[in-house]
Every structure is written in structure tokens, then in C-alpha cells.
Image: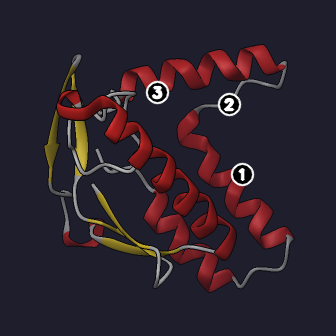
Amino acid sequence: MAETNLDAGSLTVSAQLVQDGWEVAESVPKTSSGFRVAPLDDQTVRALKAHRAQRAKERLAWGKAWVDTGRVFTSEDGSWLHPGKVTDLFERLVTASGLPPVRLHDLRHGAATLMLAAGADMKVVEELRRCWVTRR
């Protein structure tokens, strides 16, 4: 799970979803280094604020049927997004785009490369990269 502090422009990772077969459970990160605070740029903060406002409207529309998981990104009714379904959707979108195949997990490498090409400080990129590493 990640707690967002949009006023401070940060996201704190404090839990993870672990998939075993098709079952999914929440757990704490395996190591203390798994707990991370990631800075958010202004554009991301704006996008998350807009997303939060839209989800508040949807929560009202769902009423008592809304599942309050505390997650930022959820299924339509507020319930957990299953990691396998997210991966499947991503793979379908990549195929439909006509782009070369890429795994969802590998996007962090592309993001780091783009950040460095745009002139981001290597220390900042390295710290963000650590936030993106999936711990299994």
C-alpha cells in the first residue's frame, strides 16, 4: 500500500500485494529497505489530485456498495486491482499499440533512461529506481 501526501509531493510505500497462484494477500515489505518514500513531480501530483476527485464522485455513486480499501488505484467498485489482471491488460495494450513487446516490470528501466536523458540528477534517479523495484 502507498500513502500519498500530495501537499508534500510524496508517496510512502508501507505494504505490498503478494500473489500466490491466483490468491492475493497484503503484506509488509520483506525488508526495512522496502519501506520507501518517493518524491512526486508537480505533474504527477496534479494528475493524482484529479484522479482523487474523480474517485470521490464514483465512491458517492456506488454508495454502500463501495469497497473502501484505501488504495489509490482500484477496481470500479473500490476493491483491489488484482496484479494478474493489471499485467494481462498491460500486455493487451502493448500488443494493440504495435510497439515492441515490453513487460510491465521493465517500465522502470525506461523511465530511468528517460529521466537521465532529460538531465535528472543520477542520485535522484537511483533513489527512485529503488522505489520501483518489486520485492518478491
Circle 3 packing at 10 Å, graded few (<14), some (14-19), many (20+), is few
Cα distance, mark 2 to mark 1?
Answer: 10 Å
Could you tell me which residue is drawn at 68 percent across and 63 percent down?
Answer: 112
Q: Which residue is mark 2?
A: 102
Cα distance, mark 3 to mark 1?
Answer: 19 Å
Image coords of residue 80 (percent x, y) = 28, 33
The image quadrant of residue 44 is bottom right
The image quadrant of residue 13 is bottom left
In the displayed structure, would residue 134 be above or below residue 7?
Answer: above
Indicate the amino acid at tag 1.
Answer: Gly
97 on left or right of 60: right
Could you tell me which residue is drawn at 15 percent across and 56 percent down?
Answer: 28
Give residue 110's mark: 1
28 on left or right of 131: left
Image coords of residue 134 (percent x, y) = 39, 50
Cα distance, mark 3 to mark 2?
Answer: 14 Å
Looking at the image, is mark 3 or mark 1 nearer the viewer? 3
* Disc 3 element: helix
Could you tell me which residue is drawn at 61 percent across and 85 percent down?
Answer: 123
Examine the rendering and report whether any part of residue 58 can be seen.
yes
* Disc 2 element: loop
Q: Nearer the viewer, residue 82 or 32?
A: 82
Image coords of residue 92 (percent x, y) = 63, 15
Circle 2 packing at 10 Å, graded few (<14), some (14-19), many (20+), is few
* Disc 1 element: helix
Circle 1 packing at 10 Å, graded few (<14), some (14-19), many (20+), is few
Question: Looking at the image, how many numbered discs can be counted on the residues?
Answer: 3
Could you tell me which residue is drawn at 22 percent across and 37 percent down?
Answer: 18
Give residue 86's mark: 3
Indicate the amino acid at tag 3.
Answer: Val
